Image (tube, rainbow, N blue to C red):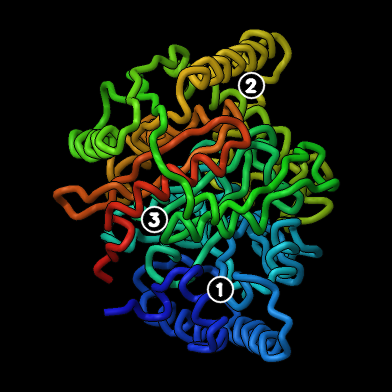
Amino acid sequence: MSEPLHYRTATDLARGLAAGETSAEEVARAVIERTQAVEPKVRAFHHRDEEDALEQARASDRRRAEGRCLGPLDGIPVGIKDVLAVEGQPLTCSSKMLENFVAPYDATVIRRLKERGAVLWGRLNMDEFAMGSSTENSAFQVTANPWDPERIPGGSSGGSAAACAAGEAILTLGSDTGGSIRQPAALCGIVGMKPTYGLVSRYGLVAFASSLDQIGPFARSVEDAALLIGAIAGHDPLDSTSYRAEIPDYAEAVRSARPPWKIGIPGEYFGEGLDPEVRAAVELAIEFYRAEGCEIIDISLPHTQYAVAVYYIIATAEASSNLARYDGVRYGHRAAEAKDAVDLYFQSRAEGFGSEVKRRIILGTYVLSSGYYDAYYLRAQKVRTLIRQDFLEAFKRVDAVLTPTSPVPAFKRGERTSDPLAMYLSDIYTISANLAGLPGISVPCGLSSGHLPIGLQLIGQPFGEAGLLGMAGHFERHHDHHLKRPPL
């Protein structure tokens, strides 16, 4: 029995659109109706314009009728994490600080999607300013995991993951600073990828930690993720950290890749704190690759033990610097009853930022302060280099590194909100790829006894997205985990 339109892959829909079996307007209507049906439970969106989405879809149908199709994404609904600028749409970062802000321009990734005819569909909930692992830090609402509405969808891109998993969008975009695409993808049972730092332009992405942030896709298949990365990747002169890399046909790489590969298994990622069911599912995946002729090599990434500490020094320092711009003067929330300019600054920030954002600003300001910069920030940068060197040394022996994505399946709402350290450890397996600037992908690899998704992570060499997608696609071709749907 074929899937309903809202659950079909972008690749499949593109074929149907090209063959005239369906229309972009029909696809948009299916997604809108699905969203209307399940959004009261999921709460993934905090803004959507249904008539605008339908008009974009009609424009796609007109182009196709005139023989001007813009490619496989033409007419495909793509949900947008509310950290990316879309001209004329709200850009809140799920924060009261930007509650009434409207983006004056398009982010580069948005411009590229528009050039390819994608239907931009809604603003998706997130942890405030992308700071969190559960989407409980949003100033507006708490998004539910479609597999169990009492549980979190992961974060910070929880709205993007939940919407894609629930069929409220065909594809979605998120951002990943320490695991914010891969971790929610794992917890929601879909594919999520963080590209190599510099592959995708950050222009128009509201900054959290500029040396760590990357934009990437959520999808219900590896080939769909490849399709979306291929659309948004490429050099951009508007981003000084953008890299001039050749962009191959990632979707073709998924279709054509075949084993054997050399796959590294780092002992540091299989120790204390790993849920036994997660371990068992990931070990089954390792055995699958072994049976396919891959060489499974035990490796060590010895500086992994410092990754969480290093991340929360560097990320908070950069957040402190980036968020200084919200001063109550130029844009964003302004306190109504300030006595003078200094009071305006203090009151505006006190009212506009939530508790987690304040916590990280305070931490970051401390580690950058006089007398502590060398002891914390500078030392963290040196250890960050050692973490990257661990991976580069491993890649002399292996093609990719395989790990769990999250140490546990989705946990219950409120379970970790009073313990920031326990929350921070949710990203223990994903942080290192950001610190090292490497690409990482999470793909579904099983369900727990509680019927909750489990994800495996593959980490690749810099700008090795094609190979990484190929390995992930090979696993997906031989399993049906990605075809399981939440019981909404």
State the residue lying farthest toward the left: 449
Query: Where is 57 relative to 246, above or below?
Result: below
Disc 2 from disc 3: Cα separation: 38 Å
For residue 176, which numbered disc appears in the image?
A: none
Q: Is residue 384 above or below residue 374?
A: below
In primary-sequence order, the first of circles 2 and 3 is 3
Please, what secondary structure does the residue beneath circle 3 have?
Answer: loop
Q: Nearer the viewer, residue 383 or 295?
A: 295
N-terminal label among 2 and 1: 1
For the C terminus, give its image quadrant: bottom left
**Apparent side of residue 74 relative to residue 324 in the rendered image (left or right):** left
Element at label 1? strand
In the rendered image, which residue does mark 2 sit on?
A: 366
Per the model, the C-alpha gap separating discs 3 and 1 is: 17 Å
Please state the horizontal and vertical placement of residue 477, each as a whole percent of the image: 34, 54
- Looking at the picture, which amino acid does disc 1 mark? Pro
Q: Amino acid at mark 3?
A: Ile
Crowding near the residue tagged with mark 2, few <14, some 14–19, many ≥20 C-alpha atoms within 10 Å: some
Q: Position of residue 299 (x, y in %)?
A: 38, 17
Looking at the rendered image, the disc whose residue lies closer to the viewer, 2 or 1, is: 1
Query: Where is residue 34, by image quadrant?
Result: bottom left
* Image quarter of residue 304: top left
Residue located at (57% from left, 32% from top) = 438
Viewer-closest of 401 and 52: 401
Report the residue marked by disc 3. Answer: 190
Mark 2 touches mark 1? (CB < 8 Å): no
Q: Position of residue 8 (x, y in %)?
A: 41, 73
Determine which of the numbered discs, if any, sits on residue 77 in the image. Answer: 1
Disc 2 to disc 1, C-alpha distance: 43 Å
